[in-house]
């Protein structure tokens, strides 16, 4: 039995749209509370950088075990994945009503726990689904999906800070919760109508085969169990790359608005607008990157992006360090420079997002992509839970030099070096080349399994005939 390369179809675009909208929601509701901390930090048990980091950390810690479980569940009950995403959305909407009644830091922690549970569902379910359904065009699918997520990232700071300044943070929280309840039926109905466009079917022969199957008879090599053959040096390197770079993402999404208010003198609302600009520019970069990586290859695009992120991180450190050493007073010109540097950091970092998601699907067998992706995300989540606390604690120490800004350099330089190692081991390939090789390997494996089954059947027939003779 042979399979053919999957082509992008109009039905897949119909499937993509509700997932895109869910992704927008997945970037509004989970990041609402960390941004809201900037508004309520003087009202509810004074929230400094460390406590804001703890709130962000709590949500992330909750996500660790549930992400692993949901990755496995996504592979086991593929037909119910869209329903699971809907359940996650309803859970995360509910945490806004807990924030609404909060009068202490402890209640905010409870809200963060519920938010973490709801937020853990979308990514380990939806992103493997896109990789499986779109085949060689997964880079483009991920880039389109990311721009919708980025729209949520852009909207959240302005909406949170702007409405809170006008109506108060409790009313703003209530409005967001009611909005979630109103949009839920539309999202759920739309996603259920697109279930019929799910076409990916895993190869059961590969999943159920537990024996070692000879693949390359010329070199007389034998593979390990088919679903474990991806575990290698490049895969381990990729895991470290994804885990380390997640720290940069968490720092930018937690503290960008704080930084521009406290260090660069912007007002609450202006800092929120700047954060939206910074994250929005990253989203545009991610959209462009999907089409670039489709043509140039995931690893090549990823490598370029992380190299640029290293340069951007160094530029930010030099700028902020110079300001501190020279005791420069912030003015409009310096504020513009700071914004441009953070835009540079965001665009260079987000440029790797589609290729990072696609590279996993190029290395990991699609049959267990959700399971492995869930484990990787759980590790990333655990690491990124600690980073905001470390960053916030360094800021609260009040060092004369901005040591906290050294973190993005470390978190981008090591991944850059690991990607160079991966390039030396697996080379630079386009998505079409990767899918062609996957197709050839899969067909060879299926043929080997069929030959073995025929051989076993023949042996059984001979043995039966032998036993029947007197």
Image (spheres, rainbow, N blue to C red):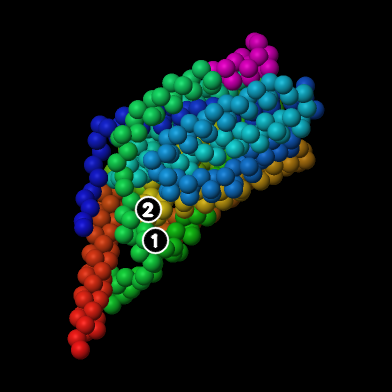
The reply to whether residue 118 is in sight is: yes
**Callout 2 touching callout 1 (CB < 8 Å):** yes
Q: How many marks?
A: 2
**For the magenta stretch, what is the residue range?**
163-179
Does residue 61 belong to the magenta stretch? no
Residue 367: assigned label: 2
Please tell me whether residue 56 is drawn above or below residue 231 in the rendered image. above
Residue 7 % position (x, y): 23, 42
Q: Quadrant of the C terminus?
A: bottom left
Does residue 169 belong to the magenta stretch? yes
Q: Residue at x 25, y 38 (%)?
A: 8
Q: Residue at x 31, y 47 (%)?
A: 201
- Taking the view exactly as shown, the residue that stands out farthest to the top is 166
Q: Nearer the viewer, residue 434 or 119?
A: 119
Side (left or right) of 15 relative to 21: left
Q: Nearer the viewer, residue 173 or 225?
A: 225
**Dot 1 surroundings within 10 Å: few (below 14), some, or many (20 or more)?**
some
Question: Could you say whether the residue bearing mark 2 is in a helix, strand or loop?
Answer: helix
Side (left or right) of 53 relative to 423: right
Distance between the alpha carbons at the discs numbered 2 and 1: 8 Å
Question: Could you say whether the residue bearing mark 1 is in a helix, strand or loop?
Answer: helix
Work out whether mark 2 precedes mark 1 in sequence or the reverse, and give the earlier one: 1
- Taking the view exactly as shown, the residue that stands out farthest to the front is 470
The reply to whether residue 437 is in sight is: no
Q: Residue at x 67, y 40 (%)?
A: 58
Please tell me whether residue 14 is drawn above or below residue 123 in the rendered image. above
Q: Residue at x 63, y 42 (%)?
A: 62
Label 1: which residue?
227
Residue 217 % position (x, y): 24, 75
Residue 163 % position (x, y): 61, 14
């Amino acid at each position: 039995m042979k399979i053919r390369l999957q082509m992008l179809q109009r039905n897949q675009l119909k499937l993509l749209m509700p997932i895109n909208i869910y992704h927008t929601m997945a970037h509004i509701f989970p990041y609402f509370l960390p941004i809201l901390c900037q508004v309520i930090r003087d009202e509810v048990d004074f929230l400094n950088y460390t406590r804001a980091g703890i709130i962000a950390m709590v949500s992330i810690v909750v996500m660790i075990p549930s992400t692993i479980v949901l990755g496995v569940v996504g592979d086991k009950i593929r037909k119910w994945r869209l329903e699971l995403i809907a359940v996650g959305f309803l859970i995360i909407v509910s945490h806004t009503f807990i924030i609404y009644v909060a009068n202490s830091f402890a209640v905010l922690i409870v809200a963060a726990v519920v938010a973490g549970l709801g937020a853990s569902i979308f990514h380990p379910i939806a992103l493997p689904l896109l990789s499986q359904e779109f085949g060689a065009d997964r880079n483009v699918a991920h880039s389109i999906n990311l721009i919708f997520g980025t729209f949520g990232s852009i909207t959240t700071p302005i909406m949170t800070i702007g409405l809170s300044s006008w109506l108060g943070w409790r009313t703003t929280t209530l409005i967001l919760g009611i909005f979630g309840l109103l949009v839920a039926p539309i999202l759920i109905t739309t996603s259920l109508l697109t279930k019929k466009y799910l076409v990916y079917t895993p190869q059961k022969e590969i999943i159920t085969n537990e024996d070692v199957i000879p693949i390359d008879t010329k070199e007389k090599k034998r593979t390990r169990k088919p679903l474990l053959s991806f575990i290698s040096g490049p895969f381990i390197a990729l895991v470290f790359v994804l885990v380390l770079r997640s720290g940069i993402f968490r720092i930018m999404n937690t503290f960008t608005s704080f930084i521009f208010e406290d260090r660069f003198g912007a007002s609450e609302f202006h800092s929120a607008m700047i954060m939206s600009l910074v994250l929005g520019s990253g989203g545009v970069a991610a959209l462009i990157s999907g089409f670039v990586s489709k043509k140039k290859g995931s690893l090549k695009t990823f490598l370029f992006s992380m190299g640029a992120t290293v340069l951007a991180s160094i530029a930010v450190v030099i700028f902020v360090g110079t300001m501190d050493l020279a005791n420069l007073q912030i003015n409009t010109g310096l504020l513009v420079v700071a914004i441009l540097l953070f835009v540079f950091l965001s665009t260079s970092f987000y440029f790797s997002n589609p290729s990072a998601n696609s590279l996993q699907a190029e290395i990991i067998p699609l049959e267990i992509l959700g399971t492995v992706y869930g484990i990787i995300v759980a590790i990333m989540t655990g690491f990124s839970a600690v980073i905001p606390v470390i960053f916030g604690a360094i800021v609260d120490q009040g060092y004369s030099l901005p040591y906290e800004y050294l973190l993005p350099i470390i978190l981008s330089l090591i991944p850059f070096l690991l990607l160079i190692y991966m390039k030396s081991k697996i080379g630079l390939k386009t998505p079409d080349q990767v899918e062609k090789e996957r197709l050839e390997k899969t067909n060879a494996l299926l043929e080997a399994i069929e030959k073995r089954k025929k051989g076993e059947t023949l042996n059984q027939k001979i043995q039966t005939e032998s036993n029947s003779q007197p």
